[in-house]
Amino acid sequence: MMASKETTTLKSRKAARIDTEITVPPDKSISHRAVLLASLSNGACTITNFLEGEDCQSTAKAMRQLGIFIESPEPGTLVVVGNSGRFTKAFGDIDCGNSGTTMRLMAGILSAQGFRSRMVGDDSLSKRPMQRVIDPLREMGAELSADGDKSCPPLCIEGDRALHGITYRLPVASAQVKSAVLLAGLFAKGTTTVIENVRSRDHTERMFEFFLIKTKREEIWENPNSPKTRHLLEVRTTIEGGQIPESRDFAIPGDISSAAFWLVASAAQPGSRLLVKDVGLNPTRTGIIDVLIRMGARIREVIETSLHGEPVGNIDIKGTTLQATTICGAEIPNVIDEIPVIAVAAALANGITIIRDAAELRVKETDRIAAVASNLRAMGVTVEEFPDGMAITGGSPLKGARLPCHGDHRIAMAFAVAGLFAEGETIIEDAACVNTSYPGFAEALRHIQKGGHIKGSTPVLSGFKSPTP
Ligand code: S3P
């Protein structure tokens, strides 16, 4: 992105009392999938409230490179004309930018296209592991390899092998791997089943159902009839190959992972009140609400409607002095993207918050355990780092600091929120990466910092629709 250093710096200071309502940008995970499913479908689909962040633009650009007609009649709207699962060979490499979701989900589709493809990414994506998609896709008969060190991108896919269905138990809880296998399953002969021991986000499955792909979903429980002791053993998702999504229009709800920044800002400020409107409330994504409730925040979550298979509604939150909690086990995939800002909540809470079973954070856009620990320490917080998490001793005053974000959008935004509670100014360097998932974050930050009381401004912010005043 061409921008001066000045414009890419995020600055924050102690916030006034928050009393406002906001909307947040469209959901990133759902936006990626909407473009992919529409491109695979048998006709024209209009996608509204599409996230115009850089990650989802990478997916749309890739689809165009593969011969799909996509136009944007107005900001946030895409008309995608699907070609019934057929694509044409891209001219040159497909650039996935910073987006692991683009590369991993497309690996499933490109494995069955009858032509060779090569996907590349930026410095951060070039360090992210691809073996996790290579293994199951090879089992399905695909020929692909990662040409970087330690199975990192570029990812080269021959595409001309016939795929067959498999039953695959996910070794890591990953919606990206699950989705890659299910997308490949559309092109495979026979039945493809993915088994998860821990439930990950289920947007692909819901969207398959919405686009009329026949999908079978089963949950296997221990003690299924006892609400207190029942325990989810596995989730199985099965599809038959040879199905083409039926073209449909699709609208995308607000992203709870973007709302998480303001939920924490409000939860940790005694006396605050925040209403987040029109946000996705898919239960595989709402773990942040459970965590903040355990920490003492008062939260009311109201599902207003089901938008094309996804629950959508409002979150009403009142802040307080937070208390420490423990986050581990099956809850981790549900809060994986929110952990940087949950760590900030932990630094503001009384007691020691423990985060475990989250080794996946080490292979995100940056090593998020190391980045969170070092930034919190720079703000005066005691943090013990574990291979799979950290222990954060909360409750001491935060000091403003100049902090790196390592090109990671969620680290940049989490620490801009920390700055709302710190003495002095907090400066996040090289923060242009926020555009990956949250165009308009700087305006939203200013709005929240003033408690929502900017004279003459509208209280409702939308990530990309509100121009800079
Ligand atoms: C995503 C899944 C998660 C998440 C990422 C988006 C998706 O990654 O962290 O931001 O849209 O499927 P993993 O599948 O690697 O856990």
Image (cartoon, grey):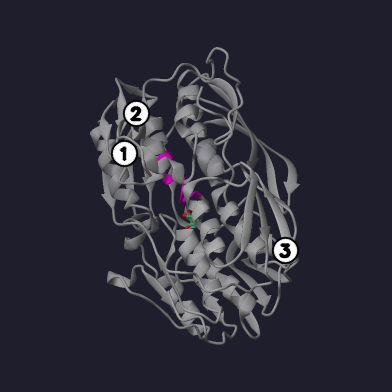
The location of residue 356, given as percent across then percent down, is 38, 53
Which mark's residue is nearer the viewer, 3 or 2? Answer: 3
Beta carbon at label 2 within 8 Å of ligand 1:
no
Does label 3 point to a residue whose CB lies under 8 Å from ligand 1? Answer: no
Which residue is disc 2 drawn over? 395
Disc 1 element: loop
Which residue is identified by label 1? 430
Q: Quadrant of residue 193?
A: bottom right
Residue type highlighted by circle 2 = Gly
The magenta segment is 335-341
- For mark 1, does the 10 Å Cα neighbourhood hold few (<14), some (14 to 19), or many (20 or more) residues? many
Dots 3, 2 in contact, CB < 8 A = no
Q: Residue at x 65, y 72 (%)?
A: 85
Please state which amino acid type lies under the numbered disc 3: Glu
Mark 1: amino acid: Asp
Disc on the earlier residue, 2 or 1? 2
User: Looking at the picture, how far across and down is residue 357, in whole percent?
Assistant: 40, 57
Query: Which quadrant would the N terminus be assigned to in this image?
Result: top left
Q: Is residue 450 above or below residue 327?
A: above
Residue 340 included in the magenta stretch of the image: yes
On screen, 49 above or below 124? Answer: above
Q: CA distance from mark 3 to mark 2?
A: 46 Å
The spot of residue 45 in percent (x, y) is 71, 57
> Which of the marked residues, 3 or 2, is nearer the chain's N terminus?
3
The residue tagged 3 is: 209
Image: 46 above or below 260: below
